[in-house]
Amino acid sequence: MHLLQVRTRVYLNANIAPLSPWISMPSRIDSDAIQSILHGIRLEQSDALYLYALMKIYGRGVEKDTHSALQFLKKLTARGHADSEFVLGMLYLHGAEGVAVDISASTRYLHSSSLHGNSNAKCVLGAMYNDGVFVQRDEVKALQLLKEAAKMQNAHAFVHLGMMQEYGRGGLESNFSEAMMYYELGREHQIAEAIYNIALMKAAGRGCAKNIDFAKQLLEEAATLSYAPAMYRLGQMLTTVDNGSQTVDYRLALSWFRKALLHNDSRIHREAEFAVNQIMLLYSDVEKSILHYEQLFKTSMQVHVL
């Protein structure tokens, strides 16, 4: 299957990432910071309550307790706290320890968060409306939400706008130059999907000069950000002669396919698993042929397949 054919299917069924890519916490929180947050909680300060909820979700500085975090977040939603609404929306969207998936609650919190000005909520809802995931498909509404998020410099929104521009959705005409501009903005913020999209455009010469070597470099850049589709695509490129080096490298391809599998990404997991099995089957056939000729000529060929 051609790169762009695979990519279209991946885009139309794009997963909405869980909480961690949107909101992160430092791996360690010092005691002074914790005491400051606890003091803020005693004063009923919204930001302190919110930070403490995140600490509970991630288990940073305190014992991990998602159920307790929910209580803090729900208390804040009564105050119209947009960030808390967003976190609740994402927790209910994907589920978590002690939190069952509840799409109705998720979309309700995300809509409220978006209305209260959270750019991440606008971006997630924009992606939902664009693909008709959990909501009635509405590309025009998706475009509006994503543009609002982009005005707030939301890096993920740049990527989604790039895809809408590339494929001509939401009433937009397909425009590769505009798409590339948005992807480059996403790349500046180290968004792996933006880097990956640029790589595929470069690999296919889509609105730009075809450059396989640069495409491979970009895919490796996205792979270092733990982006499984980039790992899969690197493996795929290495199984054809159209990969810059003009040589097939099944050994390296197998390595990339296996790395992609480790991330258990539903967008490429089945394809990567199939690729691994096919390469292993190929090597098995080669080994059988080597054994056959060794027996035929009564000699050791001293060939190591893997």
Image (cartoon, rainbow, N blue to C red):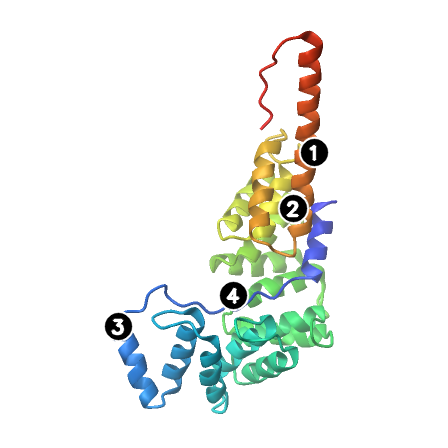
Q: Nearer the viewer, mark 3 or mark 4?
A: 3
What is the C-alpha distance between the residues marked 3 and 2? 45 Å
* Camera-nearest residue between 236 and 159: 236
Label pair 3/1, CB-CB below 8 angstroms: no
Label pair 3/4, CB-CB below 8 angstroms: no
Q: Earlier in the sequence, mark 3 or mark 1?
A: 3
Instruction: Tell me the element at label 4.
Output: helix
- Give the residue pinned by disc 3: 31
> Which residue is at a point 50% across and 91% down the rendered structure image?
78
- Give the residue pinned by disc 2: 272
Q: Give the answer, above or below, for where 78 lies relative to 296.
A: below
Q: Earlier in the sequence, mark 2 or mark 1?
A: 2
Q: Earlier in the sequence, mark 3 or mark 4?
A: 3
- Give the residue pinned by disc 4: 155
> Which residue is at a point 69% across and 31% down the rendered structure image?
282
Q: Name the kind of residue labelled 3 in the image.
A: Ser
What is the C-alpha distance between the residues marked 2 and 1? 14 Å
What is the C-alpha distance between the residues marked 2 and 4? 28 Å
The quarter in which the C terminus is drawn is top right
